[in-house]
Amino acid sequence: MNFIKNITQTQLFKISSLNSLSVILKIGVGLVTSKLLAVFVGPSGMALVGNLRNFMTSLESISTLGFQNGIVKYVAECDEDKSELQKIMSTVFISLLLVAIGLSGVLFFLAAYWNNQIFGSHYDYSSVFKVLALALPWYAVSLFLVSVINGLGRFKKVIWITILGNAIGLLVSLVLIWNYKTLGALLAIVVTPALLFLVSFYFVNKEILFLNIIRFHYFDFKIIKNLSSYSIMALVSSVFGPLVFLAIRKNVIATVGIDQAGYWETMTRISSYYMLFVSTILTVYFLPKLASAKTDIETKNVFWSYYKSILPLFIVGFILIYALRFFIVELLFTKDFLPVTVMFFWQLVGDILKVAFLILGYQFFAKKLTVAFVISEIASLAVLYFLSNYLIQFFGIQGVLIAQVLDNFIYLSVLVIYFRKNLFLN
């Protein structure tokens, strides 16, 4: 009993419990929206939704200059130094706002071009990109505010922002998808993130008087220079990664058809739900811990606390998900999506490997290992792209999933070797 009591009283357990509530809510939101998508847009519409999601991921990283993880690190380090904190916040806020406004102009006036690039000439959803142009500055600022709260160590508030954001997003998605079908689904993707600004601003303003801190004369180019390493790392993964997946999906459509691409996007969507548990706890809890670790021993302790507490739970969870795969697909979607069930095995194997290497990958950000990260990330994406295009010829859509497993295994092996001193230090 004392053992259980000790576990339940730890900060990690308390944060994980609240985080689990947040993720469960987000999955609930995803359940409802996925059902609506399945009913109103079908597999082909799901493929279009996937294309826009990939584009949004790249755009998110560009609009924030890839500074998010860097903001967490530097705010965490300057929590007690109010003057330096003011410089960081003013510099980053002004930079992001200017970039977001510039990107908005490009999106608005070239909406037809982006429509052809993302959806193809057979579809006309140019209005989606015009709406995105109006929403982008608010979205960029909200991401900045969440990073500030995270850096201040207010873990619970970060999670509450996510919870409230998901609740708002659900209402918006319901209305838009119900009334406008595929167009509504696409609009929900671009509008919902911007609404997060209202929630994040409220929580930040309770911690620090945000509007009183931001001043132009505090702008410091040295801070931009310090954050540039994080910018490079984030842009490589968040821009090139989605573009590679977009290219793979286009090849899937050309090789085995848009319905198969829709099934793959459906499997990816399901995966994103349960992977939220690990990605959020890594960002909210483990990244600040890695960033503040001063010695190899401290880093090793962070790594192994993750492998002893998080990884085993996920392996058990993945086994349960595989056993319930038919039920999950029919619950989240419709019987038309049952072909997705044959994709679960390779997807889950790949995701177990991903859960294993994610904590090591976050060390790149925590310690600003820019060159190593860029080389490993580009190499991994290249392996995934070429393996996917090669294996799809022999195994169809399953070839893409097998390619992900092989790529994740190679990436995990490389990271274990690279961080062996931190992992196996005596």
Image (cartoon, grey):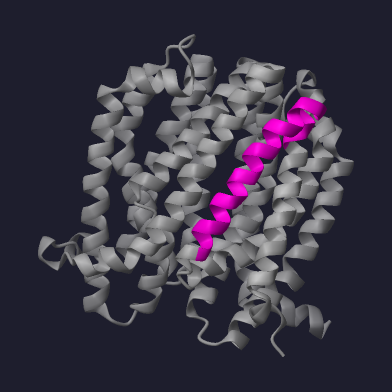
Magenta stretch? 372-400
Instruction: Tell me: residue 217, above or below residue 167.
Output: below
Magenta region, mostly helix, strand or loop? helix
Quarter assignment of residue 43: top right
Percent from the top left, x then y, of residue 222?
Answer: 23, 69
Percent from the top left, x then y, of residue 70?
Answer: 40, 65
Residue shown at 80%/20% (left/top)? 335
Instruction: Tell me: residue 269, above or below residue 292.
Output: above
Residue shown at 49%/43% (left/top)? 240
Q: Work out whether residue 268 or residue 169 is closer to the camera in this orientation and state it.
A: 268
Instruction: Tell me: residue 112, above or below residue 362.
Output: above
Quarter assignment of residue 86: bottom left
Q: Is residue 393 visible?
A: yes
Percent from the top left, x then y, of residue 209?
Answer: 24, 65
> Relative to residue 318, is residue 294 drawn left or right?
left
> Relative to residue 26, is residue 112 drawn left or right?
left
Q: Is residue 393 magenta?
A: yes
Residue shown at 38%/40% (left/top)? 195
Q: Is residue 156 magenta?
A: no
Instruction: Tell me: residue 6, above or below residue 310.
Output: below
The quarter of the rendered structure image containing the N terminus is bottom right
Residue shown at 52%/61% (left/top)? 373
